[in-house]
């Protein structure tokens, strides 16, 4: 009989732990979840306290069989799935699927895959935490109820194949409402006045901004037009510019905390244009283990799904030791830094994302990592070390300059002490700006007064980084949900990314508007955040999961019934276009990839034609290229993936060819 069996989710994690634990342990992988709700039916008995029906996932039956056999042959079984709620639920499902002897099954958790941490977890195993399981179970059932009840409604009223989700739909609403704000935005004109100045007998020119007249400061939009700006320029003509006040003071800038899931996804998006999903895939690889040669494999970072900024005292002590040795005593903070999440529901029992050892510097690890792994690991390592360092100190100067009644201000700063900036700089770093030595009473030479026209700008479209930040600030979803939520919206074509910004597609706008109208509670940001808080309370054992579902479902069911009765079906839009194949009228329909022309005689006639963004029919463009099969001219057509070449003899010849993308 095997002494001990350890079950994890992934083969990579199994390989890493296997090398750490050695021959006395058998390590097996479940390849993620082994049980779930049935794929093609609700699987929730609403009348019987929302009792779920779980099935072994179709492609996991062989794995379950192998794990059942391995568990019977082991003296002790350790479930080492991830330390979050989903990991707890996976372990619980494993026990149920294998019908394991629960007396021989223990749960172990660790936030990093290193020899010492795993040894400690094996010394202190526990039972499966049913509060965590129930929180995950409640989330899964909630999402199933919303998805399985709303999706058929949307498919019947809008178009086939649409789906809705509890967190997904609220996220869509944020993107759609931002688009509407941008469309409605009316820019306002305003002007600024700059003075290009220098000291007497000095060539160096510096710039000052007009900030006040007398004791009254100008508001941003106060100089509203060109005539107002020109009047000020006339008033300044021939006036002497004299330094009236010089203010010098140090400015301290503290380092940012180490990463949690949200901030890691945001920074990886800003710095490397990584999607949230890509960031999490790479982070998972770094967490589960990297082969360092000589039969050594180790996790390079701590668990990557966390909303905590906390750091263990041991990791902090090691970081301070490294900083003292590498940079000197002056780069240590006055007292060790402690960071706390602003989130009301942050799971502070977890740690922030950090390297498992400060000694594994990015340079030392570079030969073991691919390019994307190296980028992300460097980011995590640098952010953690910098978070434990002394503040950066800037010398700042503000110079007020009078010209008659008008007051201009020039500012400058330079780094006095770099502190944490030695290791990590954020993308929008404050630049040094050095002014010439100035003192009160100095008379300056005016080189030029420059009026500048500006217009107020609408709120920006969401990027991956700003959307995740907004979701976190509102308490919508949790660290594990950001990436899949965004991926679902993109896959469903509710939104698209243009120039790294989210834009809603027409289908997304229609779906969001209908859901806001008929399901205001589900689409309410505060309600969604409150539901997340309820799930957290279940995890803490302070609320019953069945009660939470009951409180949600009854009003949801009533609203759903009203929507089925009152929501009008979106009908095809009639046009004057004639179908070239059957001479019926063409109509505009809504498809997955937007609006398109379709024959009104569908399904008898299946002719369709694409429409451009302005709703105009896209006519095939003739080319000089000949069809390789029949010799007819090739034409440029449009499909769901963009332009392609097609034979003009279609449907007799169905030859197509892709158009190479320009470099």
Image: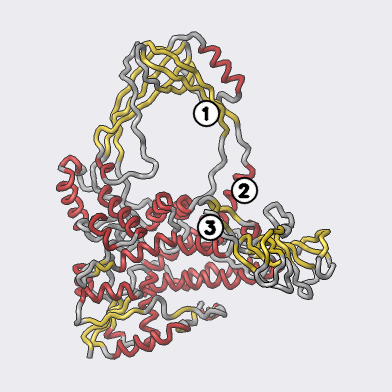
Q: Quadrant of residue 416?
A: top left
Query: On residue 180, which mark appears?
Result: 2
Disc ID at residue 555: none
Does residue 392 appear in this view? Answer: yes
Q: CA distance from mark 3 to mark 2?
A: 15 Å
In the foreground, 443 or 618 = 618
Left or right of residue 521, residue 320 in this image:
left
Q: Does residue 566 appear in this view? A: no
Query: Circle 3 sits in a helix, a strand or a loop, which is it?
Result: helix
Q: Position of residue 519 (x, y in %)?
A: 61, 61
- Closer to the camera, 533 or 260? 260
* Gap in angstroms between the C-alphas marked 1 and 3: 33 Å
Q: Can you identify the residue that label 3 sits on? A: 171
Residue lying at 60% horizontally and 44% vertically, measured from the top left: 182
> Split into 4 quadrants, where in the image is the N terminus?
bottom left
Instruction: Compare residues 36 and 242 and report the one nearer the observer.
Output: 242
At 28% from the left and 57% from the top, the residue drawn is 354
Residue count near mark 3 (Cα–Cα under 10 Å), binned few <14, some 14–19, many ≥20:
many
Counting residues from the start of the chain, the first of labels 3 and 2 encountered is 3
* Circle 1/circle 3 CB separation < 8 Å: no
Residue 220 is labelled as 1
Please provide percent x and percent y for residue 551.
52, 68
Q: Is residue 538 left or right of residue 509?
A: left
When the figure is inspected, residue 222 is found, relative to residue 38, above or below; the finding is above
Q: How many marks?
A: 3
Q: Quadrant of residue 380?
A: bottom left
Separation (CA) of disc 2 from disc 1: 25 Å
Asked whether the residues under the numbered discs 2 and 1 touch, taking CB atoms below 8 Å apart as contact, a structural biologist would say no
Marks 3 and 2 in Cβ contact (< 8 Å): no
Q: Say above or below: 80 vs 254.
A: below
**Element at label 1:** loop
Quadrant of the image occupied by residue 70: bottom left
């Amino acid at each position: 009989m095997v002494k001990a069996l350890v079950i994890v989710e992934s083969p990579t994690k199994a390989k890493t732990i296997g090398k750490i634990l050695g021959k006395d342990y058998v390590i097996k992988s479940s390849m993620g979840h082994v049980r779930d709700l049935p794929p093609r039916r609700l699987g929730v008995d609403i009348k019987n306290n929302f009792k779920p029906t779980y099935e072994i996932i179709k492609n996991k039956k062989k794995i379950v069989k192998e794990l059942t056999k391995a568990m019977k042959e082991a003296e002790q079984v350790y479930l080492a799935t991830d330390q979050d709620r989903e990991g707890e639920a996976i372990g619980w499902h494993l026990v149920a699927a294998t019908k394991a002897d629960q007396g021989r099954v223990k749960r172990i958790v660790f936030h990093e895959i290193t020899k010492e941490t795993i040894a400690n977890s094996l010394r202190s195993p526990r039972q499966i935490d049913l509060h965590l399981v129930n929180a995950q179970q409640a989330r899964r059932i909630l999402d199933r109820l919303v998805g399985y009840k709303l999706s058929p409604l949307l498919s019947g009223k809008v178009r086939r194949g649409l789906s809705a989700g509890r967190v997904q739909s609220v996220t869509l609403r944020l993107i759609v409402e931002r688009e509407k704000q941008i469309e409605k935005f009316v820019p306002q004109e305003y002007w600024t006045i700059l003075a290009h100045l220098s000291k007497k007998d000095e060539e160096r020119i510096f710039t000052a901004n007009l900030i006040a007249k007398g004791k009254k400061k100008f508001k941003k939009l106060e100089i509203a037009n060109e005539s107002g700006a020109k009047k000020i320029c006339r008033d300044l003509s021939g006036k002497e510019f004299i330094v009236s006040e010089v203010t010098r003071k140090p400015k301290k800038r503290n380092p940012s905390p180490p990463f949690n899931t949200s901030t890691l996804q945001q920074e990886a998006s800003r710095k490397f244009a990584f999607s949230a999903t890509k960031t999490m895939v790479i982070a998972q690889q770094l967490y589960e283990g990297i082969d360092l040669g000589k039969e050594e494999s180790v996790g390079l970072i701590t668990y990557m799904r966390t909303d905590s900024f906390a750091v263990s005292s041991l990791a902090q002590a090691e970081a301070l030791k490294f900083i003292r040795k590498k940079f000197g005593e002056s780069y240590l903070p006055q007292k060790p830094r402690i960071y706390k999440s602003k989130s009301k529901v942050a799971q502070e029992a977890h740690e922030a994302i950090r390297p498992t050892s400060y000694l594994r510097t990015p340079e030392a690890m570079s030969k073991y990592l691919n390019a994307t792994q190296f980028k992300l690991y460097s980011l995590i390592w640098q952010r953690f070390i910098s978070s434990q360092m002394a503040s950066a100190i800037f010398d700042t100067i503000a110079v007020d300059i009078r010209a008659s009644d008008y007051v201009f201000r020039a500012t400058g700063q330079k780094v006095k002490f770099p502190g944490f900036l030695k290791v990590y700089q954020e993308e929008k770093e404050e630049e040094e700006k050095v002014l010439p030595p100035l003192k009160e009473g100095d008379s300056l030479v005016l080189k030029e007064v420059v009026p500048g026209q500006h217009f107020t700008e609408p709120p920006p479209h969401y990027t991956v980084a700003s959307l995740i930040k907004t979701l976190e600030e509102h308490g919508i979803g949790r660290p594990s949900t950001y990436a899949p939520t965004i991926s679902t919206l993109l896959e469903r074509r509710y939104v698209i990314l243009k120039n790294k910004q989210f834009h809603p597609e027409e289908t997304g706008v229609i779906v969001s508007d209908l859901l806001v109208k008929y399901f205001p509670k589900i689409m309410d940001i505060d309600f969604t955040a409150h539901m997340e808080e309820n799930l957290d309370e279940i995890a803490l054992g302070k609320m019953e999961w069945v009660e939470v579902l009951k409180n949600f479902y009854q009003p949801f069911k009533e609203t759903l019934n009203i929507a089925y009765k009152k929501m009008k079906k979106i009908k095809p839009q009639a046009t004057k276009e004639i179908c070239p194949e059957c001479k019926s009228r063409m109509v505009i329909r809504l498809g997955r990839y937007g609006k398109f022309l379709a024959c009104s005689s569908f399904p008898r006639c299946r002719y369709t034609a694409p429409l451009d963004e302005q709703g105009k029919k896209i006519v095939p463009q003739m080319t000089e290229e000949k069809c390789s099969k029949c010799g007819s001219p090739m034409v440029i057509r449009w499909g769901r993936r963009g332009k392609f070449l097609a034979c003009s003899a279609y449907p007799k010849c169905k030859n197509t060819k892709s158009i190479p993308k320009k470099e």
